[in-house]
Image (cartoon, rainbow, N blue to C red):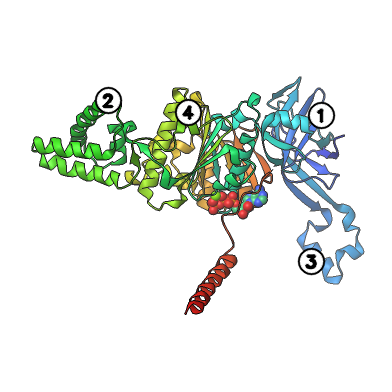
Amino acid sequence: MEAELGTVISTADGPTTLSFSFVISNPKVKKGQFVKVEEGQAAVLGFVSEIFRANRYFERAESVAEYERASPMGESFPVKDWEYTVAKVSVQGAFEDGHFLRSYLPVSPGSRVIEAGNELLKKFLKFDDNGLNIGTLQHHQLEAKLSLDRLLQKHLAILAMSGSGKSYLMSVIIEELLDRPAQDGRIAVVVIDSHGEYSGFKQTKYAKQTEVVPAKKFKIAFRRVSPHMLQEWSPEMSAAQLRELVPIMEQLRKEKKAKAEPYTIEDLIMRVEGEMAEKKKETVRRPLVAWLSELRSSRLFSKSDFPKLQEAVAPGKLVVFDLSDIENQYRKQIIVSYICRRLFKLRKKGKIPPFLLVVEEAHNFAPEKAERKQALAKQPIITIAREGRKFGACLCLISQRPVHLATSALSQCNTNIILRITNPFDIEHIGESCEGIDSSTQDSITTLRVGEALVIGEAVGSPIFVKVRKLKSQLPQKGVSLQLLAARFEEEAKRKKEDVEAFL
Ligand SMILES: Nc1ncnc2c1ncn2[C@@H]1O[C@H](COP(=O)(O)OP(=O)(O)OP(=O)(O)O)[C@@H](O)[C@H]1O
Ligand SMILES: [Mg+2]
């Protein structure tokens, strides 16, 4: 039985089709809770947007001051009996004949307000019994099971300040994806892991489904690199230089293909050296060889890919590219650029299953403003954001600086999950880029605690606050406390000193 919460009142500004107020009879009512009012055949659904308290005895400042000078008002008057609490409700819609409609009639003053039941909420919020359980709906005992299609197909962004639980939430979503039975449709998950936060999956019950690729081992088959990609990775290369390079590359590719021989960037450099010397084009040779040598210094190119994405990316599997073991930004950018391109290409050809590509620190790979050299992966990410939907290539961008994230990529993310943010610029930016976020919801973002999330957009019928569930298998912690790190350092130093003394 759904609990009764109060009675609709008539106020200067309501009830209207958009809002109404009710006087609370049940202390369980909370801001953000969903409530309903039954009106004939229809049920009007709304959520408590604010709660006010009032007391006639304390309305006039001068009388309160006067009385209180003598003794507390509570001693002379029955002040407690006159206190009442009013909740303001923002109407979300009306449920009639099995359908949700826009509310077309205001509720009547005097109507009973009751708790919105789980079945009604599931329908209204578009939860799916086979969906991904990310936690519980705030103030309700209802699991927030988001539909796979709605959440991921039109891309997802997880935005919040550092340490607010972005990677934790993503790990929860990954667990849900890895646990899906084949008949519900399983997708592959690929993570670009900037800080090595996901390699812990290898030490959980998901070990068999997980492959962790340290960036140092990552290799690109040079035969798969087109002149266009080379130009993207050496943005300062001029059109004239590229014109010289294309025929040489094509020739090399043709020859090697005929002999079914792989080749590397060294082969191309030698060719360029040879041909340019022959044609006596010293002015072209030097910069071209310089670009190619710089690319070679990234030590990323080889005769074949490692890992072979076509084999690694499989339904119900997780591939983590752990970029935490390399410092070189240029190398990271090329890796991400190649992974995005290759995944999308393989998916378009149907050679890999539908996948979710998770990009941590997305503002580093798809920045709004940056030199081209610092944004080598931006274009491939935007391509998946724009065209991925039709092919089942889904993207999840995770960032603690949404202001610096490319708008053209962020605007394609139809669901946003926002955790705690306090920076006013970031909040303002989110308010502008998210549809359906009102000012009171926007203000609530600063009050979220770690592990509490606001879900807005395609995945849900209306913005909701969720308490993110606990992980099924605790991942080993990456961020250890400062206190512990400092103590560990001193202990280690002491031990080394003792070892040396013992040796002497
Ligand atoms: N829902 C949750 N339940 C329990 N603990 C959580 C939850 N969410 C986050 N935490 C804890 O909070 C801490 C920070 O979380 P997390 O590493 O996911 O933050 P982050 O937003 O990814 O930070 P960064 O931007 O620095 O990567 C972790 O220790 C994590 O275990
Ligand atoms: Mg993180």
Q: Residues within 10 Å of mark 4 (few under 14, many from 20)?
A: many
As shown in the figure, which amino acid type bears the numbered disc 1? Glu
Compare residues 445 and 129 and report the one nearer the observer: 129
Pointer 3 residue: 65
User: Where is residue 195 shown, x and y percent of the image?
Assistant: 50, 51
Q: In this image, 445 relative to 323: left or right?
A: right
Rendered view: 227 above or below 33: above
Pointer 2 residue: 259
- Front tag of 4 and 3: 4
Q: CA distance from mark 4 to mark 3?
A: 66 Å
Q: CA distance from mark 4 to mark 2?
A: 35 Å
- Front tag of 1 and 4: 4
Which tag, 3 or 1, sits closer to the chain's start? 1
Compare residues 298 and 451 and report the one nearer the observer: 298
Pointer 4 residue: 388
Pointer 1 residue: 38
As shown in the figure, which amino acid type bears the numbered disc 4? Gly
- Front tag of 2 and 1: 2
User: Where is residue 345 shown, x and y percent of the image?
Assistant: 42, 27
The part of the image, by quadrant, that contains residue 65 is: bottom right
Q: Residues within 10 Å of mark 3 (few under 14, many from 20)?
A: few
